[in-house]
Image: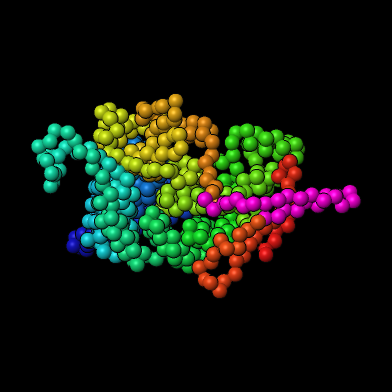
Amino acid sequence: MRQIQVYVFALIVWSWTESGAMTTKEKADSLYRAALEQVGQAPVQESLTAFRRVLKADWNYAPAHFEMAKLYMSLKTPLNRQSAGEALQEALRLDPENVDYQVLLGQLMWDQGAWLEAKRQYEKVGKTHPESAKAACGVGYYYLQEFLRERNMVSAEMPSKMAGAVNPDAEEPVLVKWNRFAEKDWEKAISHLERSLALDPRLRDAYYHLGVACMESGQPEGLTRLAEQLLNQYPGDKDALLFCGLGHQTAGSYQKAYEFYTEALQRMPPEERAMMESVDWIATEKEQRQMLQAERQRVSGDSTGVQADSPKRDGFWRGQDPLFLTEFNENRMEHYSRVAYANLHFSQPSRRIAGWRTDKGKTYIRFGRPLHQGSKRPEEEGPDPLKVVEKAYGGETELAQTHFFIETWTYEGFQLKFVGDGLDGWSFAAAEKAGNKETNFSGVSPEYVFRGTSPRYVDPYQEKKYSMPHQVAAFRQGDSIRVEFSYAIPKGRLRTSDSDSLVDLEDGVFLFDERWKEVYRDPKRF
């Protein structure tokens, strides 16, 4: 009798323990699914609270720690990155072989400014998990950034520290150009990024990074092919359409580019389309005031900006058109291409960072490609400024590491300097203008740069225009006057690459009123 009682007691204890464990797991699973569904739909703090409920039910629920790490990283402050590191370490403790956790550790290192350590982490993941496309992409992105920095970078080196120096005992520093290293890094970037796409053809970041490599190495056709592949993976994707337009425009196929830009506009969310169609970033303050005044007179109520469908805006663009003979507005096309380039070069799709929102992207859209780009290692900028760089993130202060680089964009009469922050790429560091220099690295407001300097456009036909002898004659016909223009074109100076080809001449008359509303158009081909 005593043996039977012991057996029954043991059975009851076992059943209670097993039932309790299953209930805890089911509760944690249910809470996790609910928390996961609201990510991106609810504020970050609410999502963090939801995942804390999961961990309260089961602290050893590794996916909850992982999701919290990603949420903390999205807040982009030093304190939250520290919290992200703690959450990620817990996830790795519970599941050390999880490749997603290991890849996120590399991304966190990058966000903290430890770029070389991040690259090593990605390489480590690639060795243990060769199927990881994100790890290969991370290594490729590191080498791409090295290529972009080194191609324009110079530094002062002491000969005693230089391998193969002609005079190693010299006391004066030697100016060293780093572009010879850039080619090797470009090849490594291409290799790793192409491998990442072979592993995962839907990895958006790899398309963007490879597209940058194509554009910066003078291969627009390569960008077009990549954009078409991206369209195959994501049909109707507005960025892929923009990149197709950018590739065709850079290669000289303006009509195809215009068609892709037009389709991209139709697929953009309202905010981005308003930015792409708006003149706010490219018109002068005076022009914007005039357009706003006209817009307020046209519609009842007040207006906070020039609308995308504003007649005044259309008139502004017509006034910017350098050649009415073509079906498209070259300056407007240039604006579209700048937005496309900004989204290609400065976007980070996996982090939901749009290129046109970044400091570099805004600068490129307003001023275009700089006359010169140069980068220097921090110690070359002076004894103090970037030994330790202070940058505010949401009211907190973070100390940048000394290996951060400074990049300078030079335009006519002014320069803009950017500091690599390890987060979204680059942010404003300083601005220099003739007669008004700011050489500290405490930061310059974008308003100072954008509103203080006129937008910059270069006439695409500047080198192609020519003059010829001509006569203007006017004839009265009743109540009207007929105006005739006669041009003396020397036939002997007209040449074609093919002796059997004909020469096409285009001519036309275009009349506009004071509001740049077209009242007459008569293009002709002879």
In the image shown, does 74 or 484 lie closer to the viewer? 484
Q: Main secondary structure of the magenta part?
A: strand
- 107 displayed left or right of 251: left
Of all residues shown, which one is farthest toward the left? Answer: 169
Check residue 485 for magenta coloring.
yes
Residue 13 on image: x %, y % = 27, 56
Residue 18 on image: x %, y % = 30, 59
Give the residue drawn at x 44%, y 63%: 221
Q: Which quadrant: the N terminus? A: bottom left
Give the residue drawn at x 69%, y 43%: 312
Find the magenta span and give its range.
463-487
Residue 149 on image: x %, y % = 32, 46
- 258 displayed left or right of 445: right
Check residue 261 for magenta coloring.
no
Residue 360 on image: x %, y % = 43, 42
How is the model colour-coded?
Answer: rainbow
Give the residue drawn at x 20%, y 38%: 174
Of all residues shown, which one is farthest toward the right? Answer: 478
Give the residue drawn at x 68%, y 45%: 315
